[in-house]
């Protein structure tokens, strides 16, 4: 359907799971800003979604909370603000659903170990040179 939100391949949020409200935008703008409801407030309830599996719900709830809210009032046009809000929501969900790669522990190379120890020796020698001489020397 046209109003469904395409987050990524294989994940499309149906329009009925999105809650859109419109209101006046704040700030200057004269009569148009005072009368036109161009600000878009787009909400998505993670817990009640029918398209997310339990692992996706858990990941989103951990990163974004139970409800994801996006507001757009960048343009004078309600339609354009609606497009922007939907794009922001899709990008927010897309980035929150990314599974971080596991870090594979590696050993330092022999050369890097040698350079590290040599730098430590140089630093220790520099600091030893700065000390006040002992009385027995």
Image: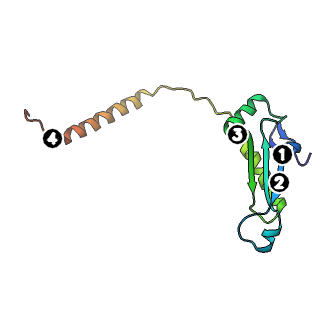
Disc 2 secondary structure class: strand
Q: CA distance from mark 1 to mark 2?
A: 10 Å
Evaluate if marks 2 and 3 touch, with contact meaning CB atoms under 8 Å apart. Answer: no
Q: Earlier in the sequence, mark 4 or mark 3?
A: 3
Q: CA distance from mark 4 to mark 1?
A: 72 Å
Evaluate if marks 1 and 3 touch, with contact meaning CB atoms under 8 Å apart. Answer: no
Question: Within 10 Å of the Cα at label 1, are there few (<14), some (14-19), or many (20+) other Cα atoms?
Answer: some
Question: Within 10 Å of the Cα at label 4, are there few (<14), some (14-19), or many (20+) other Cα atoms?
Answer: few
Residue 85 x/y as whole percent: 77, 53
Residue picked out by circle 4: 132
* Residue nearest the observer in this picture, 132 or 121: 132
Residue 14 lies, with reference to residue 78, above or below; the image says above
Q: What residue is rendered at 73% in x and 64% in y?
A: 26
Q: Nearer the viewer, mark 4 or mark 3?
A: 3
Q: Is residue 96 left or right of residue 10?
A: left
Question: Within 10 Å of the Cα at label 3, are there few (<14), some (14-19), or many (20+) other Cα atoms?
Answer: some
Q: CA distance from mark 4 to mark 3?
A: 59 Å
Disc 1 secondary structure class: strand
Residue picked out by circle 2: 21
Q: CA distance from mark 2 to mark 3?
A: 20 Å
Q: CA distance from mark 4 to mark 2?
A: 73 Å
Q: Nearer the viewer, mark 4 or mark 1?
A: 1
Evaluate if marks 1 and 2 touch, with contact meaning CB atoms under 8 Å apart. Answer: no
Residue picked out by circle 3: 65
Which quadrant of the structure image shows residue 38?
bottom right
Q: What residue is rendered at 36% in x and 29% in y?
A: 114
The tag on residue 18 is: 1
């Amino acid at each position: 359907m046209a109003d469904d939100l395409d987050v990524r391949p294989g994940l499309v949020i149906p329009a009925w799971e999105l809650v859109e409200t419109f209101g006046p935008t704040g700030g200057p703008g004269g009569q148009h800003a005072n009368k036109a409801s161009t600000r878009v407030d787009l909400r998505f309830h993670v817990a009640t979604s029918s398209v997310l599996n339990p692992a996706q719900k858990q990941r989103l709830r951990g990163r974004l909370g139970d409800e994801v809210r996006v507001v757009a009032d960048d343009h004078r046009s309600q339609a354009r603000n609606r497009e922007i809000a939907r794009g922001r929501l899709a990008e927010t969900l897309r980035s929150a659903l990314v599974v971080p790669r596991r870090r594979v522990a590696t050993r330092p190379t022999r050369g890097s170990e040698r350079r590290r120890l040599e730098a430590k020796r140089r630093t220790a020698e520099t600091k030893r040179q700065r000390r006040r001489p002992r009385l027995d020397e």
